[in-house]
Image: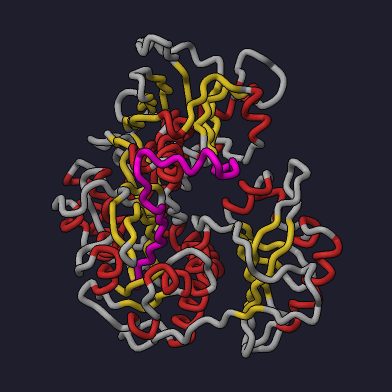
């Protein structure tokens, strides 16, 4: 990519004559990002001085989106500092403009040939995990994969957030170290009973959290069996549900089994039948409502959780097209988030799908009012594209989250036991303050403190988190936060669970759910976003949000807390 047509022509002519090379050219970073969102490239060659984004920021953007190929930057002469910055930011090679560019291109060709072999090898190595991770990484349930002896190979963010540890602290450790000894011994006895005829087991047991509590969760254990008969890998998903078998019950009690449905593999996709079986089996094992369509809009997976939610069996939905998957939610066939993912970029930009956000490879839809089984619900979805080894789109997956619609005068929380929903803290959250008179302060204080927002089923809290007090030299190191905030990574966010008691000790502001009139969320664009809480007496409180990632997490938190009164701007 380069905004000089002559240079584009030189590169195009050169690589078209090189055996084994295919080249695509464009003049702007915007065009390049569109291409990279739909096609798989081995290498990117970019001019530093692009009109809409400099080459280093483009490099950071595409690396953040998961591009793992070679990145070569083109610089002007006497701009060595640009080349150094580029290499420090993850570039692989640089070419200087000028009379020697043709000779540099010969060297560049050899560099690309040598580098692509390793990249393609690494890409093939991770391909077997790609579909699995694309589905589970954003799943709200606590997901963990471990080997026969218990060594953890993968955990998702819901798992790490719940137990209060980082992913690096979990992977490689033993899963059974998080389980009370009595429970872990019985789990190890049950695992060998998972066979192709009994592919999963649903049980309840405790898990050890970082705050030394042992909450009881429901777990669905599945064996990932290999055709060669090697030792299986196990996957388990946990959630707070009661009423199923507990490990402490009489061992003679029957174990509850849940067998995944047989997938439909007749959608005409070029993928093999075994690939589709793995794909659909993985989705079916998830406890969240999930469905998937192929690129033609035909349903290829409809898991058990979405069967329970909608009352429609997989056998009645698999193979259906014409957007019939929308009927259980909207009463008619109409576009959903998965349609946005599979259609072309041009159609996406036509304005038919308002309010959809993209964060990395995940698409997040707006909250919508629907009726499911005659019950009014709030629904929002997360979607992911699935590509084959050549980078071609083959399917789209949507995970459904629903909250039952309640009237604004709902007071069930007065008698319901208070339970923690979630929350986040960040140095990018700032409190300007509110007052009893209902006025809002107009100034944002210096970023010396980080704040947090947390919710239970009954209350919403704003806290000042001492872990993010920038005026104190102890504790966390804040140098990385500046870079992380620039690059949009998640290191600025702390969403580990907290006890209600600890939240109350750090309290800046709290409000009962029944006292709220409106919650307003303003998206950060050029200026900071903000969250404003309005109570029924006309008073208000505002928190400023400097970071897009923090905003999206707060949006999901409010949707889980009180979606009926949320107003998004």
Q: Nearer the viewer, residue 303 or 500?
A: 500
Q: Which residues are magenta?
A: 394-422
Residue 362 magenta-drawn? no
Residue at x 41% of width, y 42% of height: 410
Give the image location of residue 206, x and y in percent.
Answer: 74, 58
| Residue 378, x across and y down, in percent | 34, 52
Name the colouring of the figure.
secondary structure
Residue in the image at 62% along x and 90% along y: 197
Instruction: Please determine whether, in this image, residue 204 is positioned above or below residue 49.
Output: below
Q: Quarter holding the C terminus?
A: top left
Relative to 508, residue 22 above or below: below
Residue 416 colored in magenta in the image:
yes
Tell me if I can see residue 235 in this picture: no
Residue located 79% across and 70% down the image: 149
Q: Is residue 3 visible?
A: yes
**What residue is at 64 percent from the left and 73 percent from the top?**
202
User: Relative to residue 248, is residue 238 drawn left or right?
Assistant: left
Residue closest to the eye, 175 or 35: 175
508 vs 555, nearest the viewer: 508
The answer to whether 386 is drawn above or below residue 410 in the figure is below
Of residues 562 and 107, the one nearer the viewer is 562
> For this view, does 121 lie left or right of residue 14?
right
Lateral position of residue 471 relative to residue 458, left or right: right
Q: What percent of the width, then of the height, locates residue 511?
A: 48, 26
Question: Which quadrant would residue 243 be assigned to in this image?
Answer: bottom right
Percent x, y for residue 183? 80, 65
């Amino acid at each position: 990519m380069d905004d000089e047509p002559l240079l584009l022509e030189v590169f195009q002519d050169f690589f078209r004559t090189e055996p084994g090379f295919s080249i695509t050219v464009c003049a702007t970073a915007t065009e390049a990002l569109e291409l990279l969102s739909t096609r798989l490239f081995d290498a990117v060659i970019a001019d530093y001085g692009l009109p809409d984004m400099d080459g280093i920021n483009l490099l950071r953007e595409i690396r953040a989106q998961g591009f793992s190929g070679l990145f070569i930057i083109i610089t002007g002469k006497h701009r060595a500092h640009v080349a150094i910055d580029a290499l420090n930011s993850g570039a692989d090679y640089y070419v200087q403009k000028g009379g020697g560019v043709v000779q540099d291109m010969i060297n560049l060709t050899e560099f690309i040939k040598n580098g692509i072999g390793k990249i393609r090898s690494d890409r093939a190595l991770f391909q077997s995990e790609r579909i699995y991770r694309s589905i589970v990484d954003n799943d709200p349930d606590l997901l963990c994969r471990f080997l026969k002896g218990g060594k953890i190979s993968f955990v998702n963010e819901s798992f790490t957030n719940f137990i209060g540890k980082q992913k690096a602290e979990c992977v490689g450790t033993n899963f059974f170290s998080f389980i009370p000894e009595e429970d872990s011994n019985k789990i190890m006895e049950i695992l060998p009973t998972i066979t192709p005829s009994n592919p999963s087991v649903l049980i309840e047991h405790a898990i050890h959290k970082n705050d030394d509590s042992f909450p009881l969760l429901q777990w669905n254990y599945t064996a990932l069996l290999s055709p060669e008969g090697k030792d299986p890998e196990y996957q388990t998903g946990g959630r707070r549900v009661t009423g199923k078998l507990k490990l402490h019950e009489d061992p003679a009690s029957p174990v509850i089994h849940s067998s995944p449905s047989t997938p439909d593999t007749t959608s005409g996709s070029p993928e093999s039948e075994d690939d589709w079986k793995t794909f659909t089996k993985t989705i079916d094992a998830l406890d969240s409502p999930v469905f998937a369509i192929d690129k033609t809009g035909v349903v290829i997976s409809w898991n058990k959780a979405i069967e329970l939610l909608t009352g429609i069996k997989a056998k009645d939905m698999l193979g259906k097209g014409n957007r019939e998957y929308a009927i259980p939610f909207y009463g008619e066939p109409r576009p959903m988030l998965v349609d946005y993912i599979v259609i072309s970029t041009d159609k996406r930009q036509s304005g038919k799908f308002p309010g959809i956000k993209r964060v990395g490879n995940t698409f997040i839809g707006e909250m919508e009012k629907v009726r499911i089984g005659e019950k009014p619900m709030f629904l929002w979805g997360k979607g992911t594209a699935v590509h084959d080894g050549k980078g071609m789109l083959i399917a789209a997956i949507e995970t459904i989250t629903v909250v039952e619609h309640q009237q604004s005068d709902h007071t069930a929380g007065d008698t319901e036991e208070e339970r923690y929903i979630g929350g986040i803290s960040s140095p990018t959250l700032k409190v300007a303050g509110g007052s009893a008179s209902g006025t809002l302060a107009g100034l944002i204080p210096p970023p010396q403190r980080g704040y947090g927002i947390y919710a239970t089923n009954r209350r919403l809290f704003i806290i000042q988190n001492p872990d993010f007090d920038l005026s104190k030299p102890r504790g966390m190191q804040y140098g990385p936060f500046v870079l992380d905030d620039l690059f949009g990574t998640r290191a600025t966010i702390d969403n580990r669970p907290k006890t209600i008691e600890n939240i109350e000790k750090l309290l800046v502001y709290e409000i009962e759910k029944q006292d709220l009139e409106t919650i307003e969320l303003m998206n950060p664009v050029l200026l900071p976003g903000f969250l404003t809480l309005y109570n029924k007496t006309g008073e208000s409180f505002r928190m400023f949000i400097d970071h897009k990632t923090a905003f999206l997490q707060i949006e999901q938190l409010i949707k889980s807390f009180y979606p009926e009164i949320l107003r998004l701007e």
